[in-house]
Image: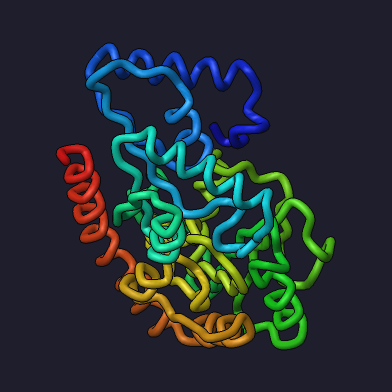
Amino acid sequence: MPNGFKRSGGRALLEGIRFLREADEDGRPVLCLFNAPVLLAAIAPRKRGSMRIGILDWTEAYPSGKSGWKMWIYNHIYVWAFRRLDVVASPVSGFRDYYNRYGANIQECLYPLPKMGHDFRHCTSDSKIVRLLYIGADYKRKGGDVLLEMWRNNRPPCAELTFVCPHPPFDSMEGVRFLTDIKAGSEEHRQLFSEHDLLILPTKQEPFGYVLLEAISSGLAIVTTRMPGALDLAREAGGLIAHTPEEAVCQSFALCRSQFMLAKCKSATKAFAHHYTHKSTKRIAELIAN
């Protein structure tokens, strides 16, 4: 359900309900990732003895901090949905604390790594060129504006930037390739990670930062701030963690100037990915077993 619960349309909702019903009939537990599948699994009729698990990391209320009576109702709808499932878990400690205060029982978990389909095979045609990747629709929140401004003023030599955003602040800039029509989860989206060396996420606020998992799965070096919910994973994967978006951009530029440090960060990411996959799979199995 890539378009969310409100915009999925009747056909997508019916297909989701049919999937849940068939899983119930077959006795298969269902793992629901992200908001729309979690809500649908809570609303859809279910067979006695079925197993439905929800994993998510954000809502409109968290981590935005929105308040008021609309958010009060919104949060209680989510808590009702959480209680309809057998297990609800989140990889973000702040999310768990937030909804546990509302009476939910959110357990700890890890997101599985996405399957990127290229197994660390990087396709850069010139090893002397460092290719940076930025992905973010809300470029102001995710620090994309800071990145472009600093790139224009102090672009590192022998580096190229791919800026993926449906509505970027600029149409063109030296050394930058702007992509505005990449669909999440598409082959073009996955291919981007095989063509780059470094992911830069200089975000100012981030519920989780799923793009960090995509970078880990692809063996990219990572530079981000202290804001993502996936901060600990980025750090354990050998990523560079900055206090501010400006510092993150500076650190990414420094990596571009040091092939040795870049290779070291990429090696750390690859080593972590294998360990993480085993750990996340084990934890999900524990959630199902309990």
Residue 266 locus on image (x, y percent): 37, 71
Q: Is residue 130 above or below residue 117?
A: below
In terms of image quadrants, where is residue 65? Answer: bottom right
Relative image position of residue 13 (x, y in whole percent): 55, 21
Quadrant showing the N terminus: top right
The relative height of residue 106 versus residue 4 in the rendered view (above or below) is below
Residue drawn at point x = 58 percent, y = 87 percent: 247
Pick the front one: 78 or 126: 78
Task: Kindly identify the residue that appears in the image at 72 percent across and 68 percent down.
Answer: 140
Residue at (24, 45) in percent of width and height: 284
**26 above or below 254?**
above
Residue nearer the viewer, 45 or 116: 45
Q: Is residue 72 visible?
A: yes
Picture residue at 38% right of the left edge, 38% below the top:
83
Q: Is residue 42 left or right of residue 275?
A: right
Say above or below: 130 vs 135: below
Q: Residue 209 location, x and y as percent?
A: 50, 61
Image quarter in which the C terminus is found: top left
Count all numbered tags in the image, as a single digit.
0
